[in-house]
Image: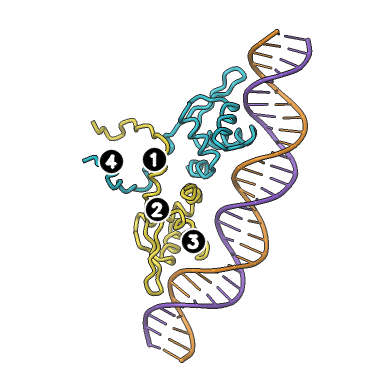
Chain colours: A yellow, B cyan, C orange, D purple
Amino acid sequence: MGDVFKALADPTRRALLDELQERDGQTLFELCTRLLHRGVGSSRQAVSQHLDVLEQAGLVRRRREGRYTFHSLDTSPLRAITRRWRIDPEEDPCGSA
Amino acid sequence: MGDVFKALADPTRRALLDELQERDGQTLFELCTRLLHRGVGSSRQAVSQHLDVLEQAGLVRRRREGRYTFHSLDTSPLRAITRRWRIDPEEDPCGSA
DNA sequence: TGGACAGGCAAGCGCCCGCTTGCGTATCGT
DNA sequence: ACGATACGCAAGCGGGCGCTTGCCTGTCCA
């Protein structure tokens, strides 16, 4: 599933994942306007195409309802990354002991 | 650090990380020949450029020794991924309870 | 029912990315 | 010292990616 990595390669798509994590179930226009507030200025079509890529990577699910299309985040494909490479443990950042 | 995501976007670079995880401290030629055995046929220059990208992303460290350059894996930048997005827990795949 | 709204589809374009090619440099063996 | 080895550097090229443009479909409201 190299699609996941390709999907993560673009900063706008990563911002979309950030936005969906902060507020799930947003529409296309909502995401566009909130991206603007983040300083990411992308047109509606551009964002839509980004969401296509994210959907194909399994990171975003679409739910049509009337004339609205709601988008929800699915981070489960990201587990493939943590499974593939052994990630060294942290240097005890919060004193878990 | 969007460099990490860009570095992971290429399948050859991911194979290089796999190879270094399996055997750390390989030279350029070693990596080339072992990639061939994995079915990834890339020239020396191509692999070298890939290693440049990986080094710039902080995923690979280079250590010059005589006329050899050894490469070692550093997975710590990958933690940024797991930190950025909340990854849903597994569906109890191995019955940990 | 007509118009506004939310979104989809497809072609075209510019640019970056990955690869090749050619040459240069430093180190090792004999 | 000379050739071979291991690698770096830089220019050039082709293909893919992201964006735009234009038009179309479907849905809600007065």
Q: Position of residue A46 (x, y in %)?
A: 52, 61
Q: Which mark is residue B40?
A: none
Q: Secondary structure at mark 1?
A: helix
Q: Position of residue B62 (x, y in %)?
A: 54, 27
Q: Which residue is mark 3?
A: A47
- Which residue is at a point 37% across and 54% down the rendered structure image? A74
Q: Is residue D17 above or below residue B95?
A: below
Q: Residues within 10 Å of mark 4 (few under 14, many from 20)?
A: few
Q: Position of residue B48 (x, y in %)?
A: 61, 33
- Which residue is at a point 39% across and 69% down the rendered structure image? A64
Of labels 3 and 1, earlier in sequence is 3
Q: Which residue is mark 2?
A: A18
Mark 2 vs 1: CB contact within 8 A: no
Marked residue chain, label 1: A
- Which residue is at a point 57% across and 23% down the rendered structure image? B69
Q: Quadrant of the C terminus of chain B?
A: top left
Disc 2 from disc 4: Cα separation: 30 Å
